[in-house]
Amino acid sequence: MQIKDLFSKKKYATIPTERPKREVPEGLMNKCPKCGNIQYSKELEKNLKVCSSCGYHGRLSARERIAMTLDEGSFVEYDETMESVDPLNFPGYKAKLEQQKAKSNLMDSVVSGEGAIGGFPVVVAVMSFDFFTGSMGSVAGEKITRAIESAHLKKLPLIIFSTSSGARMQESILSLMQMAKTSAALAKFQGDGGLYISVFTDPTTGGVSASFASLGDYNLAEPGALIGFAGRIVIEQTIRQKLPDNFQTAEFNMQHGQLDKVVHRKDMRTMLTKLLDMHMVKEVSVSE
Amino acid sequence: MSELPFEKPLNELRNKIKELKSLSDGTGLDFSEEIARLEERCKELEDTMYRELTAAQKMQLARHHQRPTSLDFINAIFTDFIELHGDRLFADDLAIVGGIAKFNGLPVTVIGHQRGKDTRDNIARFFGSPHPEGFRKALRLMQQANKFKRPIITFIDTKGAYPGDTAEERGQSEAIARNLREMAGFGVPIICVVIGEGGSGGALALGVGNRVIMLENAIYSAISPNGAASILWKDASRADEAAEAMKITAKDLLQLEIIEEIVPEPQGGAHRNLEEQAESIKASLGKHLDELLEMNENDLIEDRYHKFRKIGQYRMAEAEAGQAIE
Ligand SMILES: [Zn+2]
């Protein structure tokens, strides 16, 4: 499947249907932010936005992730028109929201819905760092909660791809409470036997890391993803020490027992399919 | 009592009265009229000033170093407190205290963030900012309460979870997240009291209650106003402005239906009169506990679920003409 396929599913007429045109020379080539390797954009996309030289996993928008992960044409979106109302009348928030919508072609930082992976029906919620640094306010919290409730009601597995800077401070306490709301919904779903696979992608920090993202029955991550609660700068100021380069990477978290597996992007669909398959109840005889 | 910057005019008046009194004693001259006039003004100023505190001033009161801590309230409100220690996994984090005690004769589990009383105590307690082992100790005690059908009462008072490398290594995110999920599922009454500063996820990790009540000058927010100011405006000195914008006071949170009740503070703040403050908290706890003790396990879980489920404001955008949704 190609990334451009996802654009055929766009539902709004006003939303541009293509990324910036490829005629512009800057769009033709791409420089890896990690190793500086220069690659053709086309090659990079074919490579699922993973650097062919150093393996750096580039950030994906929610729609790119969905196109890459779900069975082609299987995705049906939930709550696609849900948007923020600036509940605290926070200075500058409304304008910032409009700017983020225009920039990302999204209504908020979560895209949710149902579809299939490897033929297995699933409910998915995917976060997008390109909308407001993936921050969680009322809309993100509500969409995640509804996705959990939908999985519960339909007895489907739930997969959430997280990427977020944490709580959206323009909704202050309402954002903070979304951590409790989503976690409480998981308590019900998981308590009732529901399967939840959490996938950390780069970066997942703060209130999202400290709520639903860490609560998977299986916690996976993409290589190199930044995962943690507090930010590096705050920690360095607190402990008055430089932190090592690998601090809070997926590999660091794996080493410290916080993850089940680090999975390369090209293997993610296969891994998810395998995990889903493990949870399908089948009539089998194990005694041969 | 040490004075806060905004209390300066009040203290100047008080000092002037004191001066006049001692002058009158020393010289035998009669200043009684002048003293009475100043005392009147002092009282007026006190009444208006404390009635109309800004969010930033409340923040100063909430962070006052003499403000009563969880242990102060635990000792004043409960009897027979037995402190229990450790998470059984790694350590005993002194930034969180907990144990069993009696509330008007009823055995309950009490847990709270614990700031230090002086510098040494503060260092031992990480200024009330827990590591994962603190949250895991709290969880262990709550699971124990759930097993023995004891109500849980928590006191929230922290700047936030400890931002340190060792905390990250041991799973700070997971520890907080797990508490949120597990607290949602306990079949016993849970009442949370925000007594000082409710800072972010580290506060919420003790905050998933059937009832959340807040002292009048306490604050509760997703990020500290100082942090918000430096991120939003690259200027931490605009914390006062951020405090107003972020709606962090008990009054704001009652309006937003995040909390159920505001517990009034003695004039000038909780540190002015611990006994009076403990009494009013106790009265509120008693009232809420009586209501919750009427509910069965399932009702308690559902009641708590719905309290948090309804939080959040959003809308469905209307499709504009020509943009019909398929
Ligand atoms: Zn590279």
Image: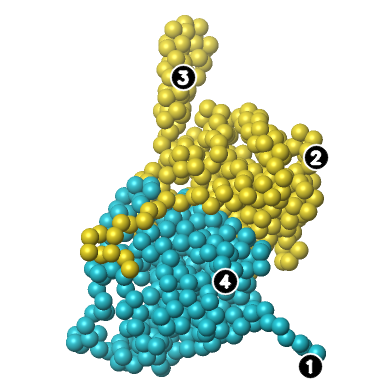
Mark 4 to mark 3 CA distance (whole Å): 65 Å
On the same chain, marks 4 and 3? The answer is no
- Badge 1 is on which residue? A288
- Badge 2 is on which residue? B80
Residue A57 picture location, percent across and down: 43, 83
- Badge 4 is on which residue? A156
For the residues labelled 3 and 2, say whether their Cβ atoms are less than 8 Å apart.
no
Of badges 3 and 2, the one in the foreground is: 2
User: What SS does tag 2 mark?
Assistant: strand
Give the quadrant of the N terminus of chain A: bottom left
Name the side, left or right, on which B151 lies relative to A38: right
Of badges 2 and 1, the one in the foreground is: 1
For the residues labelled 4 and 2, say whether their Cβ atoms are less than 8 Å apart.
no
* Amino acid of disc 4: Leu
Mark 4 to mark 2 CA distance (whole Å): 49 Å
Mark 2 to mark 1 CA distance (whole Å): 62 Å
Q: Nearer the viewer, residue B7 or A179?
A: A179
- Which residue appears at 58% of the width and 43% of the height? B212
* Amino acid of disc 3: Lys
Q: Which mark is residue A148?
A: none
Q: Earlier in the sequence, mark 3 or mark 2?
A: 3
Task: Look at the image and give the colour of chain A.
Answer: cyan
